[in-house]
Image: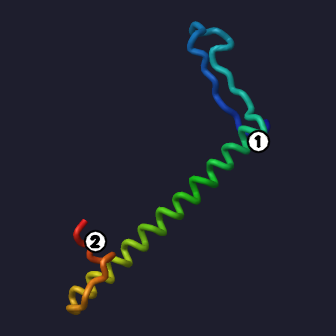
Amino acid sequence: MSDRPTKLVVDCSLPEGHPDKVQIIPLTDEEIAEREAQAAQAEAEEAARQEAAAAKEALKASAKAKLVAGESLTAEEAELLVF
């Protein structure tokens, strides 16, 4: 058995029971490269999303601390509170 990824192709124009209705086809090198690129992009986007969420939480914590201490808020902190 091969470790090469495969795809499932279903030809809905063929009747049930037809031998070519469902086919399992190995991916081409180009398809594998495309999937790897998409996975890398998704990973980078998730890391950026997590970084933005962490920055927002830090900003919220800073705004709360300043409110409790009676300090002035930055425009960015105030915007976050006024959402």
Residue 81's spot in the image, x, y percent?
Answer: 24, 72
Residue 35 horizontal side relative to residue 12, left or right: right
- Left or right: 80 with respect to 39? left
Which amino acid type is marked by label 2? Answer: Glu
Query: Of residues 25 and 69, which is closer to you in this image?
Result: 69
Find residue 62 and name its label. none
The first of marks 2 and 1 along the sequence is 1
Quadrant of the drawing holding the N terminus: top right
User: What is the total number of numbered labels drawn onto the structure image?
Assistant: 2
Viewed as shown, does residue 38 lie left or right of 60? right
Task: Determine whether 37 is above or below 45 in the image.
Answer: above
Question: Which residue is at a point 64% across and 9% down the rendered structure image?
Answer: 18
Is 68 located above or below residue 24 in the figure? below
Residue drawn at x 47%, y 65% as measured from the top left:
50
Q: Where does the image place residue 12, in percent across and percent down from the top left?
A: 56, 14
The residue that label 2 is drawn on is 79
Q: Residues within 10 Å of mark 1 (few under 14, many from 20)?
A: few
Q: Element under label 2?
A: helix
Residue matched to label 1: 3
For the C terminus, which image quadrant?
Answer: bottom left
Q: Nearer the viewer, residue 81 or 61?
A: 81
Residue at (27, 84) in percent of width and height = 73
Q: Nearer the viewer, mark 2 or mark 1?
A: 2
Q: Is residue 17 above or below residue 5?
A: above
Q: Residues within 10 Å of mark 2 (few under 14, many from 20)?
A: few
Q: Secondary structure at mark 1?
A: loop
Q: Quadrant of residue 55?
A: bottom left
| Amino acid type shown at disc 1 | Asp
Residue nearest the viewer, comparing 18 with 28: 28
